[in-house]
Amino acid sequence: MQFDCDANATYAPPPEISELFQASLKLLSNPSAMHRAGQLAKATIEEARQKILASVGARFDDHVIFTSGATEANNSLVGVLTSKHQGVVTYSTEHPCLVETFTRLNRNHGNSVTFLKPCSSGEVVVEDILAAVHERTKLVSCMAANNETGALAPLSTIVRRMREIAPHVLVHSDASQLFGKGALSFRDLDLDLMTISAHKIGGLQGVGALVVKKGVYLDPLIVGGSQEMKLRGGTENVPGIYIFGKIAERVAATLDERCARMKSARDAFEESVVERLPSVKINCSGLPRLPNTSSITIEGVRGDDLVVALDLQKILISTGAACTSGKREPSHVLLSMGFPLSRALSTIRVSVRDDLSVSDAQYVARKLCECVERMRQVVPVENLGGLTEGEVGVGGISNAQGV
Ligand code: PLP
């Protein structure tokens, strides 16, 4: 039996996925075609759009632009900037797909992008955002929940205060991690733009959406077709969109019970770990957090060694920042929070699904503690595996694949 505690990377689909998948194969016609099969595919997309709007608390006349995932949705944000004099305020703890989108804007297009850092506790301070906004600011972007620490941003306060001081500024949130793991209402939050991803809620990989409030204009990122109201060219991923709509509807209808189950498992896991290893630090535990996420710093072990050790026990966890080409990279999120390199490298992320029972969570904790105790006997605390503080760049995310 395998214990998947890496749900923030991809939330494994529910059992009914095979049925949905089978049904979706009957929809493989081009939605732009005039014949009936094409029109059926088109109608399927429109039905999924309505389901997504309802599941995220948007209005029926808001827009859902289907994309190839949250990465593309976040890249599409460049389309709201109509001149290079316009500015953006965001956080260096955002997902790399957003950080790099805006870094490129800064570098190649001359837009002024301000990357704020949260407090060392991981807290996003609303006053910092307000202070960074100036008369040329066009967009503020703040993720709803951090994928590594689970920390929630005070989104409703951010939007309310922005409306008071700078009503012309658009507010976007990457809600890829909050969707399906906490209450989310696009309209109650009064957001202008929001990013979501299908595989973070149990849908297929390669599908996502940018939700856009009625009246907000943006230039398409991908042109060359009239799909998605000319806002995203290219033949739609009909099966992926169909399944996204169905899963979103299911996730919204069962949100409270699923969140309660995730929280019970996550809390049981944390309690068991802390009981046996009292020196561990649960990051962002003082903040409102996703119910399923645990970011734990365990001094004396390397996070990536622990990931491998637990993998051998059929327990899937992550360090938060995946390594590419075998190169170990510390988490840009933790470094932005001011973690020293050694602490960042000794941090793991455990993100549970709602089908992990409390006793399974306690089993995972026991196995983790056993691995830590074994590893502490053989690996010196200060061993950073060849990386030194000086080797880590300020952003530190060039090779990171935040998931
Ligand atoms: N934004 C956040 C907060 C994420 O956690 C992820 C996951 O990797 C992404 C964006 C990218 O999502 P996708 O894989 O759909 O492109």
Image: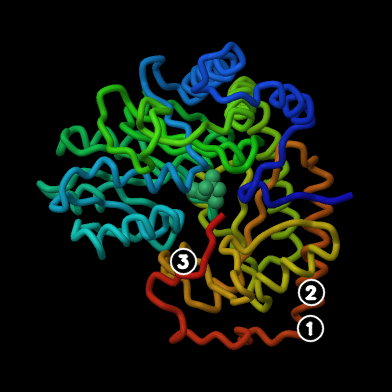
**Amino acid at circle 1:** Gln
Between discs 3 and 2, the one toward the N terminus: 3
Q: Which mark is residue 373?
A: 2
**Amino acid at circle 2:** Glu
Separation of marks 3 and 2 at Cα, in angstroms: 27 Å
Q: Residue at x 54, y 59 (%)?
A: 283
Residue 246 in view (yes/no): yes
**Mark 3 in CB contact with mark 2 (< 8 angstroms):** no
Position of 396 with respect to 365 (left or right) is left
Corner quadrant of residue 367: bottom right
Position of 92 with respect to 349 (left or right) is left
**Mark 1 in CB contact with mark 2 (< 8 angstroms):** yes
> Label 3: which residue?
332
Q: Residue at x 51, y 87 (%)?
A: 388
Separation of marks 3 and 1 at Cα, in angstroms: 29 Å
Secondary structure, mark 1, is helix
> Label 1: which residue?
377
